Image (cartoon, helix red, strand yellow):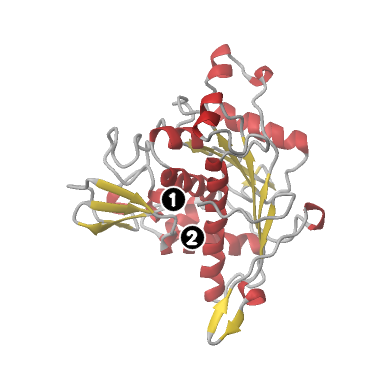
């Protein structure tokens, strides 16, 4: 496969979400949810299993021209900021779903901004990789950079936002073993997961809503091991937790885990490029079919199946049970 930000945070770029029960305040029968932030120095790695750090990759001059150089000093263009905010909102949805069912009570989730990650030429095994690295190489180098920075905690998801609109080897992004699932038991140890979302591809070939959804999509993949996915849905494929719902006769609304997989396997089938492998429209949590669909819309609202699967994963991590 080729390819209204709410940015309120502390100076170090950290946002912390806490238990809904801690934060709900009744106001005339309604409930208000607040958010608090704390500095990196105040954070501890055992604050909860839901920990995501998002890193910007280098943006080309063409990419900065698209954004009129907004965010260039911080290496955070609007598309990256919106992708990060979408991930934050997705985690909020998971916490709200769990807390409303008296599950994962007291769980804290953290989303942080990481520093710019560059791709060193010395890491490329072949000259072509220096220009157009594969997804495997990109993830290997990314994980090596994380290790060198000493930021691996054993229970975090690290998301790289890259700008590579022409790199069909990376596609829209993805993750690969052995660092595909947060807390996965690899050689007797559990560790961090690393994943990449190709924001350059979604921005150039598709739209900002697709950018948001694919950032969520690639992040949640690291919290969706196949056995838990299979216990919730009709297959062990995480994409099948998504939904594609008709809002009218010729409009289909697609949720994050179904993005790039809900349309026909052809150029322009929903997204410009279609996801490869492990796709069966009959196995989706809900798929209303794409015959006659002319308009594709995208929602960051997670399906109930996705919320349930991520919640089960976090419950297992909270019990310190290894994931496969």
Residue at x 49% of width, y 32% of height: 66
Residue shown at 29% from the left, 43% from the top:
263
**Residue 147 figure quarter:** top right
Relative to 197, is 155 on the left or the right?
right
| Element type where label 1 sits in the image | helix
Residue 33 location (% of width, % of height): 59, 72
Query: Can residue 237 be seen?
Result: no
Q: Nearer the viewer, residue 251 or 257?
A: 251
Q: Residue furthest front?
A: 68
Looking at the image, residue 79 lies above or below residue 15? above
Please name the residue that numbered disc 1 is placed on.
238
- Tell me: 318 left or right of 297: right
Compute the Cα span from label 1 to label 2.
9 Å
Choose top left, top right, bottom left or bottom right for residue 136: top right
x%, y% of residue 295? 26, 47
List x then y, in percent, for residue 161. Answer: 57, 38
Label 1 with label 2: CB-CB less than 8 Å: yes
Q: Tell which residue pokes out farthest to the top in this image.
A: 127
The N terminus sits in image quarter: top left
Residue on which the image places disc 2: 309
Q: Foreground residue, 302 or 177?
A: 302
Helix, strand or loop at label 2? It is helix
Q: Badge 2 local density, few (<14 within 10 Å), some, or many (20+)?
A: many
Q: Residues within 10 Å of mark 1 (few under 14, many from 20)?
A: many
């Amino acid at each position: 496969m080729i390819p209204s930000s709410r940015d309120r945070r502390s100076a170090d770029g950290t946002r912390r979400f806490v238990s809904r029960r801690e934060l709900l305040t009744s106001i005339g029968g309604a409930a208000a949810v607040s958010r608090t932030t704390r500095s990196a120095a105040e954070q501890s790695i055992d604050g909860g299993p839901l920990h995501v750090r998002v890193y910007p990759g280098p943006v080309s001059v063409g990419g900065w021209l698209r954004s009129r150089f907004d965010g260039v000093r911080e290496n955070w263009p609007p598309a990256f900021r919106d992708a990060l905010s979408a991930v934050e909102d997705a985690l909020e949805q998971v916490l709200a779903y769990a807390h409303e069912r008296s599950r994962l009570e007291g769980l804290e989730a953290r989303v942080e901004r990481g520093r710019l990650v560059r791709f060193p030429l010395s890491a490329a095994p072949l000259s072509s990789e220096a220009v157009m690295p594969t997804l495997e190489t990109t993830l290997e180098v990314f994980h090596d950079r994380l290790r060198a920075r000493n930021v691996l905690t054993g229970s975090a998801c690290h998301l790289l936002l890259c700008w590579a609109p022409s790199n069909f080897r990376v596609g829209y992004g993805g993750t690969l073993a052995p660092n595909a699932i947060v807390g996965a038991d690899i050689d007797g140890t559990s560790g961090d997961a690393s994943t990449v979302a190709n924001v350059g591809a979604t921005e150039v070939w598709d739209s900002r809503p697709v950018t948001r959804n694919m950032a969520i999509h690639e992040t949640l993949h690291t919290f969706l091991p196949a056995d838990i996915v299979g216990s919730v849905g009709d297959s062990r494929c995480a994409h099948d937790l998504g939904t594609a719902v008709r809002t009218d006769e010729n409009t289909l609304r697609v949720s994050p885990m179904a993005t790039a997989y809900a349309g026909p396997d052809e150029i322009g089938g929903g997204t410009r490029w279609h996801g490869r492998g492990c796709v069966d429209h009959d196995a989706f949590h809900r798929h209303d079919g794409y015959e006659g669909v002319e308009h594709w819309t995208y929602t960051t609202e997670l399906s109930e199946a996705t919320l349930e699967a991520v919640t089960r994963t976090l419950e297992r991590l909270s019990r310190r049970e290894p994931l496969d």
